[in-house]
Image (cartoon, helix red, strand yellow):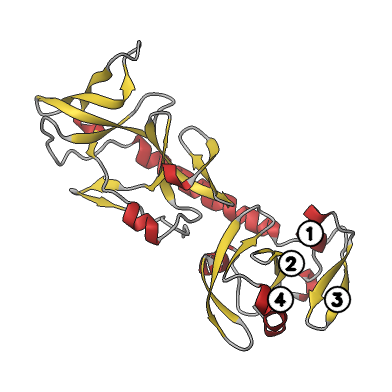
Amino acid sequence: MPGPFVKENKKMLAKTALLKTNEGMLWEVKKARETPDYFICKGDWPRFVVHHMLELGDMLIFYLVDKSTFHVLPYSKKPCTNIRHLEDLSSSEEEEKNTEFGTSRGCKKVKTEPKALSDTNFSKELHQSRIDRMSKAIKEIAFKKQQIQKPFEKGDEVEVASQEDGLIGSYYTATIISPIGSYLYRVKYKTLFSDDESVPLEDVVTASKVRPVPPDQRKILSENNFRLYDVVDVFANDGWWFGFINGIVGEELYVYFPTTADNIAYPPDVLRLHQEWSNGKWIFPPEQGIFN
């Protein structure tokens, strides 16, 4: 953040701020270090820079919503695109097209043009491109069978993947009742019940649908919050559903499920980072965090 702005607003700025863009995304930025002329930021700032493909010399317009929230618009270094729809920054305040922006030397009137170009179109295209690529990758994972690498025994806690239409990409916790030969298991589900809901549902499933229960992630998540484009599982409708975060608004995480084409907001406490059981160990998909 520039020196004059920091000096003028230093006392009222919170240590943790939210950057809000025209896409409706929120990025959490924490003040890591302060100099006489600017703040050095951490948190989501590096991902914000990558997501908007900012380069050295590019500028940002910061509109102060409150002491912890900024509405931000990328401001290109290219002269031909320097006039923007600046009224978009304060549309929630229903300001006029002639908008005042505070500076260290007072207020400056900025007149916006109705047909001005906008960086947000490019950002939306980039965002959609990532969604398309991640959706394709997740569908491929969801439709594949588990590697049969570990024989389970009676009493083992497992997760069973569903391959039924409308349920692909979901996992359900169960207990092994008994192995049946080399390729089948009888399981008792923990969250699925018989038609009259009187007893837990039992079923015979193929070994390729069974995997161990992923390790507890509470320690991981206490140190690293969920981020945009994280590949996650959401506990809903009695099972864990496979998707990725495609938006963050306040404390709500919007998760897109490629196998069902649903996009739903959830609180963080029903999410976990998705892990794949591969070669006898749990791994996180390489797409965790920003998708390259």
Q: Nearer the viewer, residue 98 or 266?
A: 266
Kindly identify which numbered label has been placed on residue 221.
none
Return the x and y of residue 149 as percentages of the image width and height: 15, 41
Q: Taking the image as drawn, is residue 169 in sight?
A: no
Q: Nearer the viewer, residue 273 or 65?
A: 65
Q: Nearer the viewer, mark 2 or mark 4?
A: 2
Taking the image as shown, residue 162 lies to the left or right of residue 52, namely: left
- Residue at 26 percent of width and 48 percent of height: 215
Q: Earlier in the sequence, mark 1 or mark 4?
A: 4
- Residue at 23 percent of width and 33 percent of height: 208
- Residue at 67 percent of width and 84 percent of height: 3
Q: Are marks 1 and 4 in contact (CB under 8 Å)?
A: no
Q: Which residue is mark 3?
A: 107
| Amino acid type of the residue tagged 4 in the rendering | Lys
| Amino acid type of the residue tagged 1 in the rendering | Ser
| Amino acid type of the residue tagged 2 in the rendering | Tyr
Q: CA distance from mark 1 to mark 4?
A: 22 Å
Badge 3 density bin: few <14, some 14–19, many ≥20, Cα 10 Å: few
